[in-house]
Structure formats: structure tokens, C-alpha cells
Amino acid sequence: MSNDIAKGFPKGFLWGGATAANQCEGGYLEGNKGLSTVDVVPAGKDRFPVLKGEMKMLECDSEHFYPSHEAIDFYHHYKEDIALLGEMGFKTFRLSLSWARIFPNGDDTEPNEEGLKFYDDIFDECLKYGIEPLVTITHFDVPMHLVKTIGSWRSRKMVDYYERLCEVIFNRYKDKVKYWLTFNEINMLLHLPFIGAGLVFEDGENQEAVKYQAAHHQLVASAKATKIAHRINPEFKIGCMLAAANTYPFTCAPEDVWKSMEKDRENYFFIDVQSRGEYPNYAKKMFERLNIKLAMEDEDEELLKNNTVDFISFSYYASRLTSADPNVKAETSGNAFKTLRNPHLKASEWGWQIDPLGLRITMNSLYDRYQKPLFIVENGLGAVDIPDENGYVEDDYRIEYLRKHIKAMKDAISIDGVELWGYTTWGCIDLVSAGTGEMKKRYGFIYVDKDNEGNGTLKRSRKKSFYWYKKVIETNGEVL
Ligand code: BG6
């Protein structure tokens, strides 16, 4: 038996930060890019109904403000931004590709060279600073043309278009990118189906059936991507990505414990398929109860079985809480998941409950369940920052949040023996909030001068946390 459990962060640990095309690029129709789902998601009170697929908004109108159109204009600022990440000593940078930048309509036979070149330039810029790109193939992003013509992921044809995208990007970037994630927060499809899968519902249809059929298509597409990736470059590492966090039972009543297990299974379901290669029995039984008959092709089972992921990546912001007792009602929000209020925890200004030990618990649960290396690809505190006249922010609250979570990670590694490849904090540079469309919900080490209404110079400046995180990376997590 080997005794080589790491004492702290292993050598070569991938420290960095994460973004998504739809929340930072802007340039929403530049370089021949087509319209994406996120481009029609407005800020303000209509955002949530649109994200959920309940309010149909297939085009932009003049009454709404659409934050993705300019976002933080990473499209034109990427050199300056990556230089700042390099200055912090980033070892990795997680970003996503905009599908509609590469295939503007999604079903085009040839890719858009301008879009491909844009990502080539970004990867070159990263590599210049010794930063390893970590690429999410789709992060809340479907070409609108596919939503309008085939209903997005409710159609099996999506698997072919996704496969085409993967062939192109894996071949093109095979010498620049090694780490890939197939779908961001794949379980978000159940909670925010428009942003998770481009789904818009018709009155009276069985939404659960549509969602699970779309999920099946994404799971098959993910397995196909894994297969193609390993054929094109056996060195590639392919990960799934879960919006993770254990659901605690409100009390030790067995009914509460049972409910928390059921809640967790809703999310594990996706990773059970991507990591173990088959639908778990509890899911098959659930489909029976809901009278859902998934349309599958003959090859699907074998494909899922033979093409499981290499690592498990996840986001973690807050733990969750549930109760079987309908009288326990006090709720709070958290990453699209409504949850009960935990009296033992404080919450962020947006109601997300802060629970560093919950990260260690979640890491252990995932590692016990899958026995594959983990990668934390999102974590952080969304907060209001007040800059001084130079754009400097004393964000001690952010430092404190991150310090405690990194300490919990360290415990999971050195005390529990969990294998963790890396850590990318969410929104390392301020960007548009996915949930609210706001700019004022900031996560970054780098401040961007822009407000909720779209005003601002877009000037970048370093916050206090910038210097703190630089030190953390420099010392490989020894100085927190
Ligand atoms: C995750 C997403 O759900 O949480 C990100 O992958 C998102 O896209 C992040 O931005 C934080 O959520 P929010 O709503 O604060 O932006």
C-alpha cells in the first residue's frame, strides 16, 4: 500500500481562474458570430422566466437590455486581461468557446475561420505566460438557429452538430489545449433549461420528459466527444462538470435524510452516467414512475459505457438544505437552486450560504463515489465592490471566503487523501452574472469599470485580492 498522500497541494497543482464566453466576450455579432441563446437573455425581471424556458424570447427587442452583447468586451481586451492573469502567476485559465462563433448557425458545414482564429490567439496568449488553457466546450451557449429550427437539445440531431464542433476544435487545438469539459454544469438543464440546453416549453407538454430526453442527448454527445478526443490526442483529459454541493437534511429525522439523498441523486444522475457509463437503477425506476420513455439508439449504451470521463470537475459555492416537513419553510437562494436557510451559516448579499467545510464534504462525496481525480472549476463570492478613485477595492470579504475554501481543499487533500488536480475561482476578472445579468455581483481579482446598465469605461484594475491570490499561487497554497 502506498503511503504517498500529499501533505499539501501537490507539485504542479493547477491554480487559476474561470470565465465563460457568454459572460465576458461581448462582440456578440462580431467576426461573423451567430446569435446564441445567451444573447437573447435580458437583464431585469424577465431574465429568470427566460432562463427557465417559460418565457419565449427568441429574438432581441428594443425594450430589454441584453448584457452579453458587450459584457466586459473580453473580445477586444483579451491580451490585456491574460497579461494580468499571467502577472498573478496563473497556471491555468478556464474559458469557454462560443459555439456560434465557430459555427454561426450550428448546422453549417464549414466552420467560421474568424472564430477559430480568435481562440487560437487566446490560447497563444495564454501559452506565452505559461498558462494551460482549460476549455469548456459549451457553457450556457447554443446557436439560436438550432433553437428555432430543431428545438435545440430536444432533438437528436444536436448530437451530430456537437460532434462536428468537437472534431473541428480537437483537431485545430490539439497542440494547445489538453484539458476539456464537455458541458458546463450539466445538471443545470433540470433547473434552468433554456440556458442549460436551449429548451423552450409549449403549454401543457410534459416538461420532465423533454428535459430528460435532452439530457440523454447531451450525455450521448459528451460520450462521443470523449471518444473523438481520445482518438485525436490520447493525451487529452476530458472532464464532466457538475453544479455540486451536498444537500444536508434539516434534522436527523430519517425522512429528512431520505429527502436529502433524493435531492443529491437528481444531480449525481448526470455524473453517474458520465463517470460510471450507465444509467443508475434509481434513475430507471424514476423514469418508470414518471412514465418517461427515453428514445435511445442501439449504439447508446455501449457508447456511454466505453467513453467515460477522465476526471470530475465541479462548481461549488454553497451547500444545500432540505426537509421533508412542509412546515419548515424559510428559504434562501443559491446558484439557481432554492434551498432552506441553514441556521448555522451566514450568507452572501445574494443569499448564497457560505460553507467552506461543505466544500470538503462535497469533495469527499464525489471522490468516494467516483474514485477519479477532481477539479474545482468554480468557487467564489459574488459581492458588491466599492472601488476608490483608482479602481482599487479592499475586498477582504472575498479573501476571507477564498482563504477558508482553499483551507478546506487542503484538508480534503492532505487529511482525507482526495485527489485534486486544480482550482479555478469563478469570474477571476469581473463579468456578467449568469443568474441575475448584473455587473454589480462581482467575483473578480480584477475590477472592471462597468455598471448594471452598461455604463463605464471598461477599465481594468487590480483589487487587494489580486495581490493575495498571487502570493497563494507563488507559495503553492502555503501562505493563505
Ligand atoms: C455557475 C455558472 O452556475 O455559477 C456561471 O457556471 C455563473 O456561469 C456562476 O456565473 C455564478 O453564478 P452567478 O449567477 O452569480 O453569475
Image (cartoon, rainbow, N blue to C red):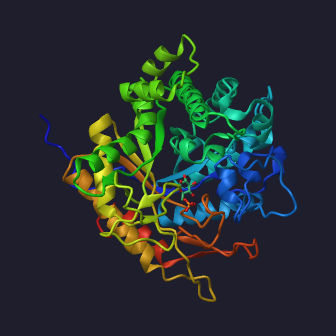
Which residue of the protein is positioned furthest toward the bottom in this rendering? 389
Residue at 75% x, 73% y: name it.
453
Quick one: 190 or 111, which is closer to the camera? 190
Which residue of the protein is positioned furthest toward the front in this rendering? 327
Which residue of the protein is positioned furthest toward the top in this rendering? 298
Residue 319: give x, y in percent of width and height.
37, 58
Residue 126: give x, y in percent of width and height.
58, 52
Q: Is residue 25 left or right of residue 1?
A: right
Q: Is residue 288 left or right of residue 99?
A: left
Count how many numbered circles sit on residues in the image. Answer: 0
Q: State whether residue 184 appears in this view.
A: no
Quadrant assignment for the N terminus? top left
Q: State whether residue 39 appears in this view.
A: yes
Residue at 68% x, 76% y: name it.
449
The image quadrant of residue 190 is top right
Residue at 52% x, 68% y: name it.
382
Residue 196: give x, y in percent of width and height.
61, 44
Quick one: 87 or 480, which is closer to the camera? 480
Quadrant assignment for the C terminus? bottom left
Quick one: 392 or 368, which is closer to the camera? 368
Residue 154: give x, y in percent of width and height.
66, 30
Q: In terms of image quarters, where does ligand 1 lie?
A: bottom right
